[in-house]
Image (cartoon, helix red, strand yellow):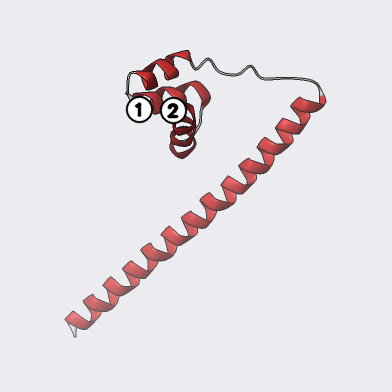
């Protein structure tokens, strides 16, 4: 009887953890969508009032890439632009070609 109760408790606990993780993933996805909409609106407002952001200086990034230091170039690109890892890696690949 005690083993059955223990197994049932473990199953309930595992179920609760799975539901919490799934709920958190959905919340993050919803926040990502909201952030993307806010960024689009901000871009539209900036364009409407004629505000242009200067392109980030990538001389240091290009120098690292020329030295064959791709990982450091990706890191420097992320710091200069605020891009995520995937975007930075793609940009470095394009700069390298």
**Front residue of 67 and 18:** 67
Task: Sort mark 1 into few (<14), some (14-19) or many (20+) by Cα contacts within 10 Å.
Answer: some
> On the image, numbered disc 2 is attached to which residue?
96
Quadrant position of residue 8? bottom left
Which badge, 2 or 1, comes first in the chain's sequence? Answer: 1
Task: Sort mark 2 into few (<14), some (14-19) or many (20+) by Cα contacts within 10 Å.
Answer: few
Which x, y percent locates residue 74?
A: 40, 28
- The residues tagged by marks 2 and 1 sit, at their Cα atoms, a distance apart of 9 Å
Left or right of residue 52: residue 77:
left
Farthest residue to the bottom: give it: 1
Look at the image and tell me in which quarter the N terminus lies. Answer: bottom left
> On the image, numbered disc 1 is attached to which residue?
70
Left or right of residue 3: residue 9:
right
Count every numbered label the image shows and give the total: 2
Which x, y percent locates residue 54?
A: 63, 16
The residue that appears at 51% across and 28% down in the rendered structure is 82
Q: Element at badge 1? A: helix
């Amino acid at each position: 009887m005690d083993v059955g109760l223990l197994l049932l408790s473990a199953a309930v606990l595992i179920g609760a953890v799975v539901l919490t993780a799934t709920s958190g993933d959905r919340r993050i996805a919803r926040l990502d969508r909201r952030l993307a909409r806010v960024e689009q609106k901000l871009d539209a407002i900036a364009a409407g009032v004629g505000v242009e952001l200067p392109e980030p200086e990538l001389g240091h990034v290009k120098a690292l890439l020329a030295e064959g230091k791709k990982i450091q170039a990706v890191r420097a690109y992320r710091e200069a632009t605020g891009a995520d890892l995937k975007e930075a890696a793609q940009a470095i690949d394009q700069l390298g070609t």
